[in-house]
Image (spheres, rainbow, N blue to C red):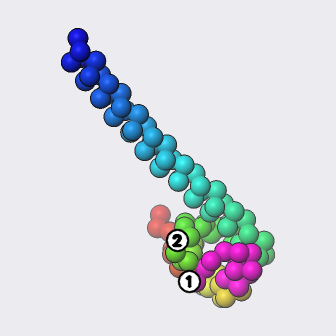
Amino acid sequence: MHQFRKRRSLRVKGLRQTCDETLSIENQLLTRALNNGKIETDIYQIVCEDFIEKCRVVQLVDGDLVIITPNSAIQSKLKQVTPTLVKELRIKGYKISTVTLKITKR
């Protein structure tokens, strides 16, 4: 009986650790999603063009803001306003050094 309890205890401990790790990862993902949503909202306020609503923030990591666009025409328009965008986002407190624009593939 003692062996059974010991094995069960180890399984429960392993399950708890797995659950804790999963919750930690989910918390990080949720935090990133909320931050991306906040950045997108701020970008929409800065760039008052219709095309900007078709763009999505993918991530902001180590000062690199990655934005995806649906096509090269919108990417070109966004590239023109990037200096203003970076300046205004820095004023709002974001630590951005570069902006990477990518086209989504459908």
Identify the disc placed on residue 61: 2
Looking at the image, tell me whether mark 2 or mark 1 is earlier in sequence order.
Answer: 2
Relative to 98, does residue 93 appear above or below in the rendering?
above
Q: For residue 93: magenta?
A: yes
Asked whether 46 or 68 is in front, the reply is 46
Asked whether 85 or 77 is in front, the reply is 85
Disc 1 element: strand
- Give the magenta range: 85-98
Q: Amino acid at mark 1?
A: Thr
Q: Quadrant of residue 59?
A: bottom right
Asked whether 26 or 16 is in front, the reply is 16
Relative to 92, does residue 33 appear above or below in the rendering?
above
Would you say 32 lies left or right of 53 here?
left
Q: For residue 67: magenta?
A: no
Disc 1 marks which residue? 98
Q: Quadrant of residue 85?
A: bottom right
How crowded pointer 2 is (Cα within 10 Å; few <14, some 14-19, many 20+) is rated as: few
Q: In the image, what residue occupies the spot 57% across and 59% down?
A: 32
Residue 101 in the image, given as x and y percentages of width and height: 54, 78
How crowded pointer 1 is (Cα within 10 Å; few <14, some 14-19, many 20+) is rated as: some
Residue 18 in the image, given as x and y percentages of width and height: 38, 39
Q: Amino acid at mark 2?
A: Val
Disc 2 element: strand
Residue 56 in the image, given as x and y percentages of width and height: 61, 66
Q: In the image, what residue occupies the spot 59% across and 67% down?
A: 57
Q: Which quadrant: the N terminus?
A: top left
Q: In the image, what residue occupies the spot 25% across and 24% down?
A: 7
User: Is residue 22 visible to the viewer in this orientation of the structure?
Assistant: yes
